[in-house]
Amino acid sequence: MSEYNTGDDTYHDGKFILLNNKYYTESDPQQLTPKELHTLIILKIFTSQFKGVNVTTYNLMGHLLPFTNVSEKKKNAAVAKELMQSLKVKGIIEYDDPKDSNEPITVTIEPVKYVEGDDRTSFQPVPEFILDRTNDPDEIYVLIAIHNVAKMCEKGEYAKPFFRNKKNWGALLGKGNTTAEKIVNSMCVKGILFYYENDVHYDQNRSKFEQGHGKYYLFPQEKEEARIRLRDEKRRLNRKVD
C-alpha cells in the first residue's frame, strides 16, 4: 500500500486527487479562486495516468465546468479559456495557446511533491467523497480547506475542528463576508457541513464575556451535539427561573 508524505501526515493509497495546500491558503501567490480550483480539479480528474498530461479543448472544458450554461457553447469556451489562462499565469498549468476553441490542447500540471522544509509544497489527498457532496465550486473550496485541517485519525474519523468566525469567510473565498457567510450557512442547512458554536466564557483580564470561533466539521460530532443540547437545556431552565 502506497503512502504519501504531505508535510505533516501520512496517508494511505486510495481514491483521491492530490492538491497543494497553497492553492487555498489566504494571501499565497498561488492561491486560487473557487472556480480556478474547480477547473484544476477537473483537469486532474481527466489527466492520463499513462502520460501524465491532459488533452482537452476550450470547448470541452466549457462543457465539463459545472458552473457554465450548457446551452451557450461559445460563452462556456470563453469562461474555460479565461480560467485556464489564469492557472497558466499562476504557474500551475502549462500549455501552448490553441488557434481556436476546438484545437486540442496538451496540458501539463504542476507536479505535487513535498520538499522538506518548504511549507508551500505541503499537500493533501482530497478524497472522492468531498467531490461527491457538491458540484458547486465555492462549496468544494470550503470543504477542501476544512479537510486540510480535519485530517483522518487512526480510527478513521474526521474529528479535528476547523475554527473560524462564522462572519469571516470572505478572505478565503474571495468574496464579501456577508456573501461568504450565506454560502457556508447554506452548506450547513444542506447537511454537507456541520457547525457548532463555541461556549461563552468570562475573560478575567478583559472583564468581559468572550466566545471563541465556531467549530466546523466534515461530519456530525456526537460530543459537540451533546454539548449543545446540554447548553440549550441550561438556557431553557435559566429562562424558567427568571
Image (tube, grey):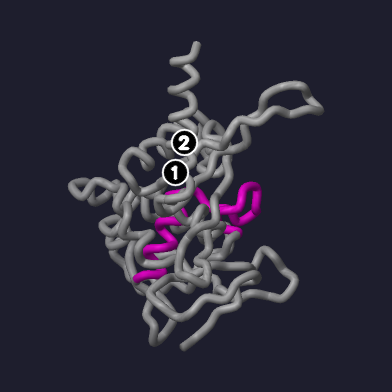
* Residue 114's disc number: none
- In the rendered structure, the answer to whether residue 127 lies left or right of residue 238 reads left
Q: Residue at x 48, y 45 (%)?
A: 224
Q: Indicate the position of residue 66 as horizontal and vertical percent values.
A: 29, 52
Q: Residue furthest front?
A: 241
Residue 44, position as x, y percentages in the image? 41, 69
Q: Which mark is residue 230?
A: 2
Q: Nearer the viewer, residue 236 or 166?
A: 236
Q: Which residues are magenta?
A: 22-45
Determine the residue located farthest toward the top in the rendered image: 242
Residue at x-position 60% and y-position 59%: 22
Label 2: how many residues lie within 10 Å, few (<14), some (14-19) or many (20+)?
A: few
User: On the rendered structure, is 42 left or right of 59?
Assistant: right
Report, in whole angstroms, how far the alpha carbon at label 2 lies from the one at label 1: 6 Å
Whether pointer 2 and pointer 1 mark residues with C-beta atoms closer than 8 Å, the reply is yes
Residue count near mark 1 (Cα–Cα under 10 Å), binned few <14, some 14–19, many ≥20 = few
- Residue located 41% across and 54% down the image: 219
**Element under label 2?**
helix
Give the amino acid type for the residue marked by disc 1 in the picture.
Ala
| Residue 196 location (% of width, % of height) | 48, 40
User: Which of the 4 image quarters holds residue 121?
Assistant: bottom right
Seen in the picture, residue 126 relative to 225 is either above or below; the reply is below
Q: Is residue 191 above or below residue 158?
A: above
Q: Which residue is mark 1?
A: 226
Main SS, magenta region, reads: helix
Q: Would you say residue 44 sits in the magenta stretch?
A: yes
